[in-house]
Image (cartoon, grey):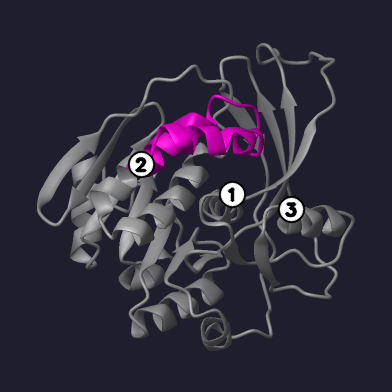
Amino acid sequence: MKFKGLFVGLTTVDIQYFVDVFPEANQKVKVTAPEMLVGGPATNAAIAFSALNDGAFLISSAGENSFSDLVRNDFEISNIDFTDLSAEKANQPVIATVVTSGNGDRNIFTHHPLPLETVYTPKQILDEINPEIVMMDGFYPEFSVALAREARSRKIPVVLDCGSWKPHLPELLPFVDIAICSSDFYPPFCSSPADVFDYLNELGIHSAAISRGGDSILFRKGKNESEIQVENVLTKDTLGAGDILHGAFCYYYLLEREFTSALTKASRVASFSCKFNGTRQWLTYLGDYLSKNT
């Protein structure tokens, strides 16, 4: 493990079906057996970081249920050092059912996790891991806010995956150093990317980006605003591409300590992942990709 990257947030069990085209209403569609993978924004980001870094730390909630062995085995294979905030507790897993069409588009059906009670404190976790960067997806608000506050006091950079607006974000954002947003992220009274950048800047976040699928990534660093063109690839599946962007960004940011370069390289890794089905198949070919792109 080169760097200590800590990822905090949601773990899901993803059940992914592949179809040629999305079915119409009231259709029964026979498909091949689904992929069953461990997912979630922070988890997928940790997987990507681990693949580049040979290891990552993940703080999430899994608990004891029918999928516990699946989760633990996946983390062991992926070289994830996992701290379970629901350790030894019966816990309802967060299931995501994903339907992916032939052109890479997907529909996702899922639900929010139950409120979390944990015996771990952010201070305990940061004392033990001593991470060089913390990346969060905004789930488990009370714990995440407390950990971000503690990380700020230790001058550990905090990266936030701003997928969509959440009511508790005004409490969390003041402790964030870098925000990587989706095109669906609109704080109150914001209606354009410029509004979003201004909102984040007023909270002290001077490095921010907005990813827009296959369109260019908009970013603002300090007073400079620009964009990064996304590589045009033959897309098979976009599931988890944004999460992979976040995990790869954390790795390249620690490697180079430069926002724009890290974002550019992470964008290329995320585009590469879209050439494969699911959120794991691309990892098999990552070594070849890196040997040609470093």
Picture disc at residue 122:
none
Name above or below for residue 3 compared with residue 276.
below
Indicate which disc, 2 or 3, sits on the residue closer to the N terminus.
Answer: 3
Please tell me how crowded label 2 is: few (under 14), some (14-19), or many (20+) other residues with Cα within 10 Å. some
* Residue on which the image places disc 2: 265
Indicate which disc, 1 or 3, sits on the residue closer to the N terminus.
Answer: 1
**Mark 1 and mark 2: Cα distance apart in space:** 17 Å
Q: Which residues are magenta?
A: 265-294
Name above or below for residue 202 compared with residue 223.
below
Mark 2 element type: helix
- Seen in the image, is 294 located left or right of residue 20? left
What percent of the width, then of the height, locates residue 202?
19, 64
Which residue is located at x 74 percent, y 53 percent? Answer: 77
Q: Which amino acid, by three-letter code, is at mark 2?
A: Lys
Q: Which amino acid, by three-letter code, is at mark 3?
A: Ile
Q: Can you name the residue that lies furthest to the front here?
A: 291
Mark 1 element type: helix
Of residue 111 and residue 4, the one placed in the foreground of this image is: 4
